[in-house]
Amino acid sequence: MIEVEKLKKVYSDLAKGEFVALAGISFRAQPGEIFGLLGPNGAGKTTALRILSTVLRPSSGLVRINGFDVMTHPAEVRRSIGFVSNNTAIYDRMTAWEMVEYFGKLYDIPEDRLKDRMEMIFQQLAMGDIRDVPGAKMSTGMKQKVSIARAMVHDPPVLIFDEASVGLDVMVARSLLKIIASLRDEGKCVIFSTHIMREVERICDRVAILYRGCILDEGTLPELSERHQQNDFEELFFEMLSNYDRERAEKLAAGGSPS
Amino acid sequence: MNWKHVKLIFSRELRDQLRDRRTLFTITILPILLYPLMGMLMLQVAQFSREHPVQIKILGSENIPESPRLVDGEQLYSRVGIESIAPLVKISSSALPELDNEKLQTQATEMLNKGDQDLIVIFKPRFREYMDQLAQTQVGEMVEGDLLDESDRGLEVILTRSRDQSQIAYNRWQIAIEAWQQEWIATKLKGAGFDPRLVRPLHIAPVDVAPEATRRAIVWSKILPFIMLIWALTGAFYPAVDLCAGEKERGTLETLLSSPARRREIVWGKLLTVIFFSCMTALLNLGSMQFTASLLSNQLAAGGARGLAESLGTPPIYAIGWLTLALIPMASLFSALALAVAALARSTKEGQYYLMPLLLMMLPFVMIPMLPGIELSLGTSLMPVTGMVLLSRALVEGQYLEAVRYLPIVAVVTITCCLLAIRWAVRQFESESVMFRENERWDLRMWITSIWRERDFTASVMEAMLCGAIILVVKFFASLASTEPISDFAGLSKAVLIGQLALILTPTLLMAIMLTKSVRTSLRVNAPKPIDFAVCILLAIAFHPLAMWFSTAVTTVYPLSPAMIEATSGITKTIIDTPLWMILLTLAVLPAFCEEVAFRGFIFGGLIRQNGVLRAILVSALFFGLTHGVLQQSISASFMGMLLGWVAWRTGGIVCTIAMHLIHNSLSILLSRAATSETSPAWLDLFVTFEKGGFHYDASWTTVSIVLSIACLWILYVRSSDSIVANESRTVDRPLTD
């Protein structure tokens, strides 16, 4: 469903010059699976997901979603995904219903089907009470629900959540994780990026640990625990990052390339 | 392109903006309130100043001649011509105090400064005596007063321009005293047995043959297009910033970019919204202004100012129709430009900073038509915005023949500008670096370090633009410094050497050394294929008649001023008098090398990046043209620059363009010299006709040369060897895909 091969992204920045945001990462995610992309801030998670959603262009490598290449068939890719970003961005002067309807129409869903689909989603996400509330008057949790509804409206096979739980209170975050889990149960392929270990432990079937643009390791949680001989996932995460930094520093000291 | 998506985005943006109170206030409430309030205020101020009586103090009333009467008690004596102002002047008269002139003036100044009086009029002690004597004097006789000091017999008026009332009092007094003088002369003439009409024997009444519609529209035809375009520009700004920078700031743009709508569809949807608001702002302002003006004109007519009221009256409805028609392309142009510029901004605040320079750049084009004597002509119709303003003015004034004559040119210029602006806006939305610019902290040292660190093999787009701008600025200041006209070879060679080596080549080389990793690559010094080179040589010769024809056409449309002809005559004389090799070296070899290195080398190489072939050809040609200083030369050089740019692109370097430039300049010099020489080779007559010290190509050779040029261009186009295209594409950044 999602195939990422040697994906590389290089940015040009005033302070750092050309810097590598993604250094040739590879991973795969299957239908009916929640694939976690775990990493600290600046690891490259958002860059990777923006490339998956065709908003950014890869510098090199291959990304295929639902069989479509992001470079050659971006329009098909966009029809195959639902993208929820971390800033819960919705239009302030549109109601929840209008916002979801707008995106539904952009996906060319016929009027009658769209209405049925929206009724179902609003019921599923318990959004009946915010149906006519404009974005400016919504709480963060409400906005996030609208974003999810907007991403689900065309019933895409792939859903991408980019740090979607950031800034949400415990209740809303919990409800969000439940929704994501239910999407997996519907057979969707879900990519879920976060820097919160507990969320990964709760819902992810497989996880890739991303740090400084590289995937340090990938697998199911039991596989990772076994490989690194560490049952505490938080400890495991810190050890991997520390080891990577130490090896990198040693390479630099030896005059080698940092990556 | 999916127009359903465009319609959807347009409808959403429109609804969104209409729900924004700030937008509604700017486009509807403000114009509805602004003009009536302004009109009311103006009317009241005008009425106040018109009806408020002024105080005039007359000192020395005993010295005023008894006949004709000037003062009637505390008012001016009402006579023909001053009936309306007589009640608005309050006179207080007193005898002339026994003071010397200096003290008298001090006293008058005090009265004025206190505000008790608005004007002081002093009739000198012997004023009446002088006037009486003057009336009885025969031609050739001397009047006693002629020998007297002016200060003893004259009339002195003291005012203070620091107060408007004093100025108004002075104006009214002038009218009154002029009428009094006329009557005094008429009385004296009558007394001497002459017809008093001798004072003003002619009564000239002009006959205005302009159609009534034109007369009614004469004031508005100048004001309305200006007001309309200013508001169209202003009306495009806020929505453009909100739809680009605002969406970026709120984070909704990323959501939209990941939807099935393509970038082009998003731009069109947003563009239509901005155009809508731009048009609405302009139309509502026009409507409100028009409504207020018609009310004002009624008031003015009621107040007696019938002439002013007529010219301010409502223009015919079709005038508004023409303006509305002209508004659409103009609003489209402004909106596309505003959208492209606003896309650069990361926040609404930043967007406002970026749009202000755009407004300032547009203003001269809107204001040129307001200058006296500027009319619709071939020259003005070629100017973007200006041409459209003048066209709409001609339509409003009912000059349809003129308008139809220039309509195709104005339409082509306007549509081209619109398409280029829209293309730019789309490119902005396709650019990753523009859409996802992070909030970087700008630091000069960091910036310089980053420029050095990120040097590429060729210049960046910005560096290329900067190079062009630097050359233009230094050339401008150098032209201000050199005021001496060129009259000999020493002066000519000095001007060319400084112009080419110091002002064009040096900045280019310095930038190439400092900003790029390879001087050779950045200047595009590549060996061409021998066949390409040979074709270019042939093209330069074949294209010369066309270039000459274009230059002649330019000077026909924009004739050289006599001062310019005088200034260039020295250069022409020097070209003829100087040994050929010296003049070829100065005016052909040196410019061909320096200008090609700068414009088709460094600047072109930078501009062609990011798929910018068209941009590279047009902008490098524009810079090349502008460095020639004189408008006529600039246009011709820009035309030639486009050809050279195209060749530079197809041949992948500057060697061919240097050769073409060299041949073009050499041919011009050789033919100019042959035109003034008595012994030009006979075979030249096959191609060229010499007359009046000039030359022109024969029509048959021009036709052949056109065919030859097309053949050469076709060969270069077809040959477009893969290596050349590959060479360019190495530095070409692909835009974001859809």
Image (cartoon, rainbow, N blue to C red):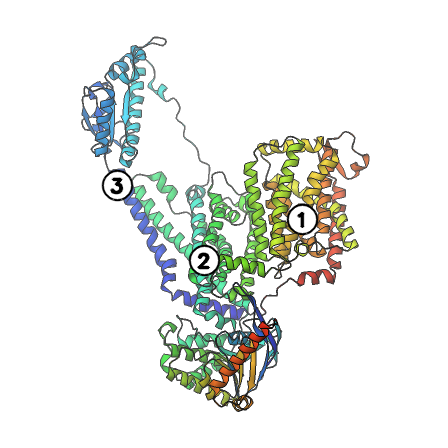
Quarter of the image where one finds residue B237? bottom left
Given residues B82 and A108, the one toward you in this image is A108
Q: CA distance from mark 2 to mark 3?
A: 38 Å
> Closer to the N terminus: mark 1 or mark 2?
2
- The picture places residue B48, in percent across and down from the top left corner, at 26, 41
Residue depth check, mark 1 versus mark 2: number of the one nearer the observer: 1
Quadrant placement of the C terminus of chain B: bottom right
Chain ID for label 1?
B
Horizontal placement of B344 versus B686: left or right? Answer: left
- Which residue is tagged 2? B236
Given residues B419 and B436, the one toward you in this image is B436
Residue depth check, mark 2 versus mark 3: number of the one nearer the observer: 2
Residue depth check, mark 1 versus mark 3: number of the one nearer the observer: 1
Q: Is residue A235 above or below residue B306?
A: below
Chain ID for label 3?
B
- Which residue is tagged 3? B48
> Closer to the N terminus: mark 2 or mark 3?
3
Q: Secondary structure at mark 2?
A: helix
Local packing at callout 2 (Cα closer than 10 Å; few below 14, some 14-19, many 20+) is: many
Q: Is the C-beta separation of discs 1 and 3 under 8 Å? A: no
Q: CA distance from mark 1 to mark 2?
A: 39 Å
Residue located at (39% from left, 71% from top): A92
Going by the numbered disc 2, the residue's amino acid type is: Ala
